[in-house]
Amino acid sequence: MASVAESVRNIFKIHELRTRIIYTLLLLIVYRLGSYVTIPGIDARILEDLANDQGGLFGLFNLFVGGAFFRAGVFALGIMPYITASIIIQLLGAVMPYFQKLQREGEEGRRKITQLTRYGTVGITALQSIGYAINLRATSFEAIVVGPAMFMFSTVVVLTAGTVFVMWLGERITEKGIGNGISLIIMIGIIAFLPVSLFNEFDRDSSNIFIFLIELGSLFLVTAFVVLFTQGTRRIPVQYAKRVVGRKVYGGSTQYLPLRVNAAGVMPIIFAQSIMFIPSTIAQFFPDSAFWQSVGTATGDIFGFWYSAIFFIVCVFFTYFYTAIAVNPQEMADTMKRQGGFIPGIRPGKQTSEFIDNILTRITLPGSLFIGFVAILPAIVVQFGILPGFAQFFGGTSLLILVGVTLDTLQQIESHLLMRHYDGFMKTGRVRSRRR
């Protein structure tokens, strides 16, 4: 079986795969460099001193955009407006016939949905940039070196253009690179904070290295459980009838239909996190309203009770919602019937669809509860004295995104290797969830 070193060499032997990886890395470098470019009208040196002690929900948002939020970078809003627009379009697809029709139109429908999502991204970014400019003036007024009107106008234009450019980078990575571009952009921003968080935790526990090693061991175990959960599947046996084509006999074997415990992947927690930003964003527009400020405070403390409770419920909801969108039992049943397959003891057609739907509903319940628990795990470990920055990597959106995006990217790399008759990237030859 190929070792990791041999697998890496095999990757660079394939021209297409090598080109895709280099292209992806270059675009990610462009994104990271852009996060350090400050929007016009801001004194970056003053802003750095003012932003050092900020945390809460804005600190979590800052984590997703690689620090650009507190640096007032041109990518301060990152890719999150695009995620929010995607959520809105998918929600509309569940209730409005027009969007349902677009979803059934194949490639042409997907192009229209993508275009509408882009338009929605521009609108949402413009609104969020207004709130961001208001919040920046209120909290970092000393760093603003131009007039209020000019600052508001330039901030809205620059932030909107920055988010559109980040969206374009993500689409280019998905099309010509390796992996999902949008998810990789979020992941690279999170990874940028890992060395600093690890060093700060080590510096605090330097007098007692044993505690630091226990924390690292706990982080390893949590990550292993998340990987195990992400790769977990429920295999349904499928029997294929024998059929004769010419002189050859096809079928007559038993295969398995794998249903993942986490069929929705990393998207539910990204969607849920985007929803959690809405109350605080609205509160920025009403700085004098006691009600909205109380709502923003309650939902802005990512380690608080109300934030954790709401976040848990929203994660469970979006897991079911996105699973219903991503997995179509009726389509599975129809495809199985056309290929002459059937589940033993279950009639083809409607009964097969209902059987798959029932199993999917049952396995999604523990999957959604697990996602919800991991989402609020940072709030739990903080109670044991772990620094908030390092606690983000014990669970929550950060860990699920890192694990989910890494596994998805490795699976795409493995697919390229297997198509060229190389062993897979993993030691076992194949990533388990890809086995049939």
Image: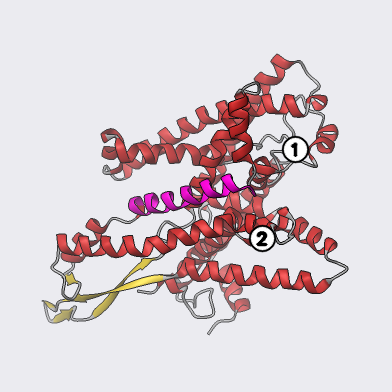
Distance Cα–Cα, label 1 vs label 2: 28 Å
Q: Residues within 10 Å of mark 1 (few under 14, many from 20)?
A: many
Query: Which comes sooner in the sequence, label 1 or label 2?
Result: 1
Q: Main secondary structure of the magenta part?
A: helix
Residue 191 in which image quadrant: bottom right
- Quarter occupied by the C terminus: bottom left
Using residue 313 as the reference point, say whether residue 396 is left or right of it.
right
Marks 2 and 1: in contact by CB < 8 Å?
Answer: no
Residue 383 in sight in this render: yes
Using residue 35 as the reference point, say whether residue 404 is left or right of it.
left
24 over 426 or under it: above or below: above
What type is the residue that disc 2 sits on? Val
Residue at coordinates 71% horizontally, 70% vertically from top-left?
216
Residue 118, x across and y down, in percent: 47, 34
Q: Nearer the viewer, residue 177 or 302?
A: 302
136 over 4 or under it: above or below: above
Residue at coordinates 77% horizontally, 69% vertically from top-left?
212
Residue 199, x across and y down, in percent: 80, 60
SS for callout 1: loop
Using residue 337 as the reference point, say whether residue 392 is left or right of it.
right
- Residue range corresponding to the magenta coloring: 303-325
Could you say which disc has been placed on residue 155 in the image? Answer: none
Could you say which disc has been placed on residue 381 in the image? Answer: 2
Queried whether the magenta region covers residue 74, the answer comes back as no
Q: Which residue is mark 1?
A: 71
What type is the residue that disc 1 sits on? Arg
